[in-house]
Amino acid sequence: MLRQELSRSVDHDPDFEWRGTDVTRIENLSDIVFAIAFGMLIMSGDAPRTFEGLNRFLLSLVPVTFAFIMMMQIWNAHFLFFRRYALADRGVVFLNAALLLLVLVIAYPLRFIFDSLYGFILYQFGYEDYVTDLRVNYRRASIIMGYFTAGYALAGLLIAALYAHALRKAEMLGLTDRERQLTRVTIWIVGMGAAWALLSCILALTTPLGAFAGFFMNATAITSPLIRRRMKPKSRAA
Amino acid sequence: MLRQELSRSVDHDPDFEWRGTDVTRIENLSDIVFAIAFGMLIMSGDAPRTFEGLNRFLLSLVPVTFAFIMMMQIWNAHFLFFRRYALADRGVVFLNAALLLLVLVIAYPLRFIFDSLYGFILYQFGYEDYVTDLRVNYRRASIIMGYFTAGYALAGLLIAALYAHALRKAEMLGLTDRERQLTRVTIWIVGMGAAWALLSCILALTTPLGAFAGFFMNATAITSPLIRRRMKPKSRAA
Amino acid sequence: MLRQELSRSVDHDPDFEWRGTDVTRIENLSDIVFAIAFGMLIMSGDAPRTFEGLNRFLLSLVPVTFAFIMMMQIWNAHFLFFRRYALADRGVVFLNAALLLLVLVIAYPLRFIFDSLYGFILYQFGYEDYVTDLRVNYRRASIIMGYFTAGYALAGLLIAALYAHALRKAEMLGLTDRERQLTRVTIWIVGMGAAWALLSCILALTTPLGAFAGFFMNATAITSPLIRRRMKPKSRAA
Amino acid sequence: MLRQELSRSVDHDPDFEWRGTDVTRIENLSDIVFAIAFGMLIMSGDAPRTFEGLNRFLLSLVPVTFAFIMMMQIWNAHFLFFRRYALADRGVVFLNAALLLLVLVIAYPLRFIFDSLYGFILYQFGYEDYVTDLRVNYRRASIIMGYFTAGYALAGLLIAALYAHALRKAEMLGLTDRERQLTRVTIWIVGMGAAWALLSCILALTTPLGAFAGFFMNATAITSPLIRRRMKPKSRAA
């Protein structure tokens, strides 16, 4: 038992007591919805029936992989939230339902967006089929980037709202100072990511920057470490 | 532990002891069926492959959201039932199976119904495509409303039957007086909703009111608070 | 706790101690496969997009319901098995995998079979569309009945094999005499059902009885109560 | 309890203490993804609507069964890993996510590959429809075999990496010497299978052996028992 305890504390989340242990029904429902969304990423289109179809399917795995990674990051944030705080009140049920709807709803567009991007890159190398097929031009690319960044921002806001909800219940959950601080760090990092996505969205739709406005989302690579350093919780020893 | 207990009692369902803790297989199966039904709401139709298709997909999210909310309400009633009473006898398995079948079966019609309504509203604003596509007129709108209210009534009856089943087992489950009264309140509210839906259904199909008979479903906005006030359980202190 | 114990012993399965409590991964995987098969029953065909499509979809719910009931019976036998014996050895994993494959594989044919039957009945009442569409005649009806009874027999054999496996491990599981006898009853009833289905299958494919040979499956209505009476376990008091 | 303990130790995995007991969320998500992949194996193509369609569907069950068996083997390795080590750290989440993506992604190709093989065999017996339909010739068969062996090798590498990860954490998990040795055996067997698959892949794509290079995958039938004998852990008594 002790050993299990030890392994748990070292492995999973060293600075956080895991309040959730068993899989609750909210998590169960969420997992299934996530898995269905994963399936939608891959299944969009029919099963390949010819050799050419098989090759095209395998070629499409590049954008699928990127879409899968993005979706998996949302799952990871969701996973951590329920393990850490084990909340299941009305507010969480509501925010979670909204997140699930978003997850289901963004699967097809996410696939479409990465397909377009991939088609664009293939086009640079002389493969023109993808782009013609999706009928995307510069203006449309901007709108697609707008959708993408809007969806990203929305997902970020919902996740930040979930963590903020947990922070409001900190007293009741008995979070330590360190845990409260870590929760705040997560809210800031996720929220800042949403803010940059929102900026990218506005710039993509309203300025001639177009799809290239998506570049601003990379600003998190600068802001996230900054937030982490500034808000560093006191060491456990203290 | 105590802290967890505390959080549980405050958060989830203050007036009710949660007899169900782990996810049972009946709940597990049900969650998956619900999630598949959610998927059917969104997936109906193919994955978008063109920019126009993507826009049409995003436009359809308005009716999808409403259908999702209705479905989520059924899930919530289901979730509460199993957490509160943790029953798994033959009667519950049977009623639950009927509810699961209903959930799977109403996904496509629910989507269709909200699509029609949405098309009707878009039509008022000059977008005629939706309505033409679904080929709906006044008489047909009445029938669709009839289907919708019938499905709603059936779902309500099944949920009320589940709660009534729990009430019959109150002795065995050791429900307190307060909990019995709360169970009765749920039965009355859900049952009354089903009754109004049934009235709407009959009026929609047999009178010139047609689809507008659906208006009577809003009567629950009056009856539900009335039931709640009249059947208010004695305070916990008493 | 005591109360919970009481409710459990009275409710679920009065004569059997439930050895399985939490949902294991084998059960979890199985539930999802069952739910997907349920979805396949309903989803076969596209989402309705026109009023006529909606009506046809609602009409098809009659055969879907029958297919759903058959599938749910398999789930129930599966559910009881894992709750009662909580076995998860190699033999169970293997038999269970075979059952899961069968469940996935029979979903479409099951739907097809009930669709044919339904079309046949509608045909008697003057609706000819269904039958023409499925292109079924007397000879083909026999073959379809052959498939159906073969699938039914196979499902029965797999379930009987699972229970027989549990009986072989009776010592290790610590089954009481009463529980062993109940296990034997289940094996006999399910096995006899499989035997009648096999007979129906052979008669349907080789004799002029054709699809009407399916009638012999009803013989379980006579043999099952007989088995139950003959093999009645001694009363608990004894 | 003792009895349950006994049954557990005898049944499941005699030489290994099961550190994982409840289904964790990572396992839950994985199960759903596996089940969806199973569904993709069977569903590829539409539901049969005619008698001919039903027959063709039933004929396709032969390749589906083989694909199902391969997929089930991956599930089994996954199942054992989480039961045995109950790890859920970053490394496991990452490797598991990669495996899940692979599982979803290989479903269609797996089906295609077994369909081709089956078509090839049917072709030998005079049924030419399958092969013509899939448009496969000798060169293409080599490439398909290349895809298959590459996917197999990748799955093997990911599973071996998971077990190697567990071995690195052996101290923390408190694995006995015997358990460490058994873990090493698994890594060697799975890794050697991946190596033979890789060799087959290279030979299939670069030499005139073509699809027949797949034959080298059977070398595991020789190497696996060898590894098992050489690395035999000391008996429990010792």
Image: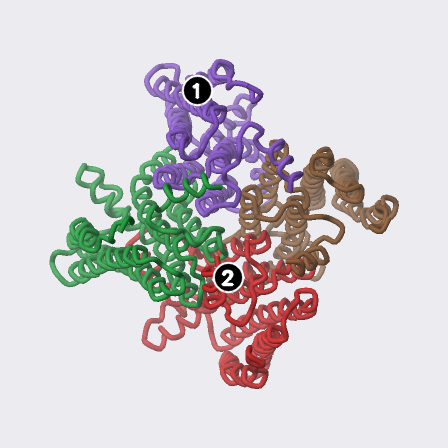
Chain colours: A green, B red, C brown, D purple
The residue drawn where x is 80% and y is 47% is C220
Relative image position of residue D176 (x, y in whole percent): 48, 27
Q: Nearer the viewer, residue D206 or C1?
A: C1
Amino acid type at circle 1 is Gly
Asked if residue D141 shows in the view, the reply is no
The residue drawn where x is 77% and y is 40% is C180
- Helix, strand or loop under label 2: helix
Relative image position of residue B193 (x, y in whole percent): 56, 77
Q: Nearer the viewer, residue C105 or D22?
A: D22
What mark, if any, has residue C76 been given in the picture? none
Quarter of the rendering containing residue B199? bottom right
Relative image position of residue A28 (x, y in whole percent): 48, 53
Q: Residue furthest front?
A: A238
Residue, disc 1:
D214
Residue, disc 2:
B107
Amino acid type at circle 2 is Ala
